[in-house]
Amino acid sequence: MSDFKSKLEKIRAVVPEHVKIIAVSKTKPIEVLSEAYAAGQRIFGENKVQELVSKYPLLEGDTEWHMIGHLQTNKVKMIAPFISMIHAVDSLKLLDKIQNEASKVNRKIPCLIQAHIAKEETKFGFSPDEVYSLFQDLRTEDYPNVVFSGLMGMASFTDDEELVLEEFGILKELFDRIKSEILSDYDPFVELSMGMTSDFHLAIQKGSTMIRIGTLLFGGR
Ligand SMILES: *Cc1c(COP(=O)(O)O)cnc(C)c1O
């Protein structure tokens, strides 16, 4: 059995069946992705547009490519024709741009709105309150080429498991409130992308549906 496959099976064994595993392959050469593909992996996460654009033609057409990093508006058009999900929608300007570029290529692009839940300062993203207001104020019909698939977030990078659990809990609660209070008639809002190598087991406890795993599958970068 390949190294990748045994690592994947170890993770699968501790993760509920409905949770999707995004193999975060950023910085890894295509041979490494091909090995993962051969082992059955179909969802790959990258955080740079240039890398996505150069890698996507090299794997089979049933591969799902997920953009997991900060996305600049001027680069949306480069990935709009093929991207399967954009995880880190962190501004209204970006959302508008995705609508515009997706419409040009006649696609509906699944998107997650990123909420920052970590105590650390960051220049990108919405606070949980801002995400709630965003959904209160927008009409999904105004974004016919965007699928509002759910939310994404990253917890603080710390050994303090209580803090990490609290932060993931805030995201889960936000997700549940938006789903029940605002999007109760909107079926596609189902995904909660949270958890990476160091904290996926905690994210799962709090209801994650997508974990983004790099180091544990592919080794250090
Ligand atoms: C790199 C990255 C990951 C994967 O991190 P690991 O710790 O290597 O599992 C997950 N999410 C995002 C947004 C990333 O940039």
Image (cartoon, rainbow, N blue to C red):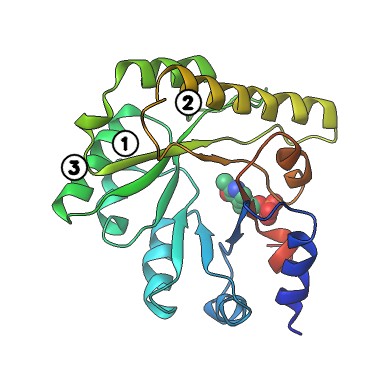
- Are discs 1 and 3 less than 8 Å apart at CB? no
Residue 57, quarter of picture? bottom left
Write the residue at 42% across / 63% down. 52
Type of amino acid at the residue the image marks with label 2: Lys
Residue 32, quarter of picture? bottom right
Disc number placed over residue 104 in the picture, else none: none
First along the sequence among labels 1 and 2:
1
Disc 2 target residue:
179
Type of amino acid at the residue the image marks with label 3: Asn
The picture places residue 19, in percent across and down from the top left corner, at 63, 51
Position above or below: 181 against 175: above
* Residue sitting farthest toward the front: 185
Disc 3 target residue:
100
Rounded to the nearest angstrom, the CA distance separating label 3 from label 2 is 25 Å
Write the residue at 50% across / 49% down. 68
Write the residue at 52% across / 63% down. 43
Position above or below: 148 against 108: above
